[in-house]
Image (cartoon, rainbow, N blue to C red):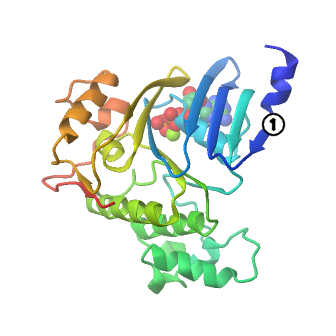
Amino acid sequence: MSSIDLLDASKTVHSAAPVQLRNVVRQFGQQRVIDGLDLDIAPGEFVALLGASGSGKTTLLRSLAGLDSIDSGQLRVPKARAAVFQEPRLMPWKRAWKNVILGLHTPNAKARAVQALTEVGLAHRLEAYPATLSGGEAQRVALARGLVREPKLLLLDEPFAALDALTRIRMHRLIIELWRKHTPAVLLVTHDVDEAILLADRVIVLANGKIAEQLTIDLPRARDTGQEGFQQIRARLLSLLGVEANEPAVQAAGAVPAVSTGNVRRFAHG
Ligand SMILES: Nc1ncnc2c1ncn2[C@@H]1O[C@H](COP(=O)(O)OP(=O)(O)OP(=O)(O)O)[C@@H](O)[C@H]1O
Ligand SMILES: [Mg+2]
C-alpha cells in the first residue's frame, strides 16, 4: 500500500451521492476488520446489513457516521447523516426535546424538536427526562434526534434489538413510515433475518471484511412474514448465511439471543 493511498484514505468526501465506499480498510492492530470493502447505497435506498458478531458491522457504521476513521480506501457519505444505536444514548439530565436538538444550532430548535417528537408519537413526552421513558420511547427520542437533522443517510445499528417483540413491530412500522416521508438512504444493522426482509430493499452480508453476499428484496410493501415469497427469500438468505431454514433466524447472523415473537405475525407497513 502506498503512502498516497493512506493520504487519500484519511479523507472523507461529502457528496450528494449518499454512500460510495471503495476498497475501504479499517484495522485495529493486526486485525483487519474491514478489508477492501466496496459498497454503494442509492438515494432513498433501504439496505439491511447482516453479519456474524464481530464481523465489523458497527465498525463500518461508525466510519460512515464520522465517529471513526478508515485506514485506506475511499469513503463518500452525505454530510447530513445521523445514527441511532442499540441503546438510545440520551443525556439523563436533559428533557426529551432538549436531547433531540443537542448540538443542533438553529434558531427554531424547539419547534423542530417538537415536530420530530410528534412524528415519532411522543408529542406528549416533550418534557420528560430519559429515566422516565420506556425503552421504546427512549429509542423513539433517539430516532427523533436523528430525524431532526434531516439526514440523507440514516444509520441504524440494531436499534430494535433491546425492545420487546410488540414494540419492535411498532418500531418497524414507524421506521417505514418515516423513511417513506423523509426518503433518506438507510443502512440498518440487524441480526434478525426476518426484520431485514420486512424492511429493506436490499440485504447485504458482511463477512471477512467485505460484502460477501447480497440479495435484492423485491416483495411488495406492506410486507409481512406470511406473504407469498417471504419464506423463499428467507430460506435463500439463510442459505447464503450458511444456516438451515429451520434453525432460528437470529442465529444466522450472530450471537444475540432469539427474541420470541410467539404467535405474533410480524409485519411492517410501507
Ligand atoms: N476500537 C477498537 N479497538 C480494537 N478493536 C476493535 C475496536 N472496535 C472494534 N474492534 C474489534 O473489531 C471487530 C469488529 O467489531 P464490531 O463491533 O464492528 O463487530 P459487530 O459486527 O458490530 O459485532 P456485533 O454483532 O457483536 O455487534 C471485533 O473483533 C472488535 O473486537
Ligand atoms: Mg455491533
Q: Is mark 1 within 8 Å of ligand 1?
A: no
Q: Residues within 10 Å of mark 1 (few under 14, many from 20)?
A: some
Front-lying residue, 177 or 249? 177
Q: Residue at x 33, y 47 (%)?
A: 195
Quarter that holds the N terminus: top right
**Quarter of the image that includes the C terminus:** bottom left
For the residue pair 35 and 132, the one nearer the viewer reads as: 35
How far across and how far down the image is residue 8, in percent? 82, 29
* Picture residue at 86% right of the left edge, 27% below the top: 7
Q: Considering only vertical position in the picture, is 161 above or below 136?
A: above
Q: Which residue is mark 1?
A: 11
Image location of residue 122, percent across then percent down = 45, 79
Q: Give the number of marks.
A: 1
Spot occupied by residue 210 in the image (x, y as percentages of width and height): 54, 23
Picture quadrant where residue 178 is located: bottom left
Image quadrant of residue 110? bottom right
Rendered position, 89 above or below 195: below
Could you tell me the amino acid type at mark 1? Answer: Lys
Q: Residue at x 29, y 54 (%)?
A: 221
The x, y position of residue 229, in whole percent, is: 19, 39
On the picture, is 177 further left or further right than 103?
left
* Residue 69 visible in the picture: yes
